[in-house]
Image (tube, helix red, strand yellow):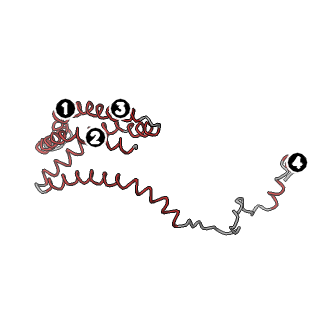
Amino acid sequence: MRATDAKADPGAEDADQDESASLLQPVDGEQSGGPQKLNPPATNVWKEIGPALTLGWPMVASQYLDRSAQQLCVMLIGHLGPEQLGAVVLATMWCNITGLSLVMGGMSGLNTLCAQAFGAGNYQRLGVLLQRAILMCLLLLIPIGLSWWFVTAWVLALIGIDPAQAELSASFAKVYLLVMPAMLTVQAIQTFFRAQ
C-alpha cells in the first residue's frame, strides 16, 4: 500500500492488517467464528404457517374440485372406447388453446384490479369490475363459440387428424361450448372472492 493511498483512506490501514477477519459482526449472544445455525422456534413457524393454511384451504379445495370435474369427464368417456377418449382429449386441447387461454388471459387483469379496489375500500368498483369481466368474457365467447361450432372439424382435418376423429372432436367441442358461460362466470366470481 502506498503512502498516498493511506492518507486518502485512513481506515484502509486497519482493513489491510487483518484480511482474514469476518466482515459480518456477531450479534449479541453469538459466538464469532465458524458457521452459525439458524434455529427458529417452532412456535414462530406455526404462527406463520397457520394463517396461510387457514386462508389457503378454500382455494385449494376449489381448485381440486374444479380439476376433478374435468378429470371425471375424461374418465367417464374413457369407458366408451379409445376413439371417443381420443376425440375428447383432442377437443379439450383444441378448446383450451383456442378459447380458454384467450378468455382467461383477458380475465387475468381482474386479479390485480379487484385486489386494488378491495384494498382501497372501493367496494362499488369491485362489483363493477366483476360485472365487466363477466360481460367481456361472454362477449369474447361469441367469436370463440362460432369458431368451435363451424371450424373445429375442418381445422383438425387440415392438420392431419382422421376426418371421423375430427368430426367426433368437433361434436364434443359443441357440447363443451354449452358449459363455457357458466365456467367463465365461476372463474370471474372466484377471482372476485380471492381479492377479499
Q: Which residue is mark 3?
A: 128
| Residue 97, quarter of the rendered image | top left
Q: Which residue is mark 4?
A: 7
Q: Which residue is mark 2?
A: 100
Cα–Cα gap, marks 1 and 4: 80 Å
Give the mark, 2 or 3, whose residue is nearer the N terminus. 2
Element carrying mark 2:
helix
In the picture, the disc for residue 146 is: 1
Across and down, in percent, residue 88 comes to 17, 48
Q: What amino acid type is highlighted by mark number 4?
A: Lys
Across and down, in percent, residue 15 comes to 79, 57
Bin the neighbour count of mark 1 within 10 Å (Cα to Cα): few under 14, some 14-19, many 20 and up: few
Between disc 1 and disc 3, the foreground one is 3
Give the mark, 2 or 4, whose residue is nearer the N terminus. 4
Across and down, in percent, residue 188 comes to 31, 40
Bin the neighbour count of mark 3 within 10 Å (Cα to Cα): few under 14, some 14-19, many 20 and up: few
Q: What amino acid type is highlighted by mark number 3?
A: Val
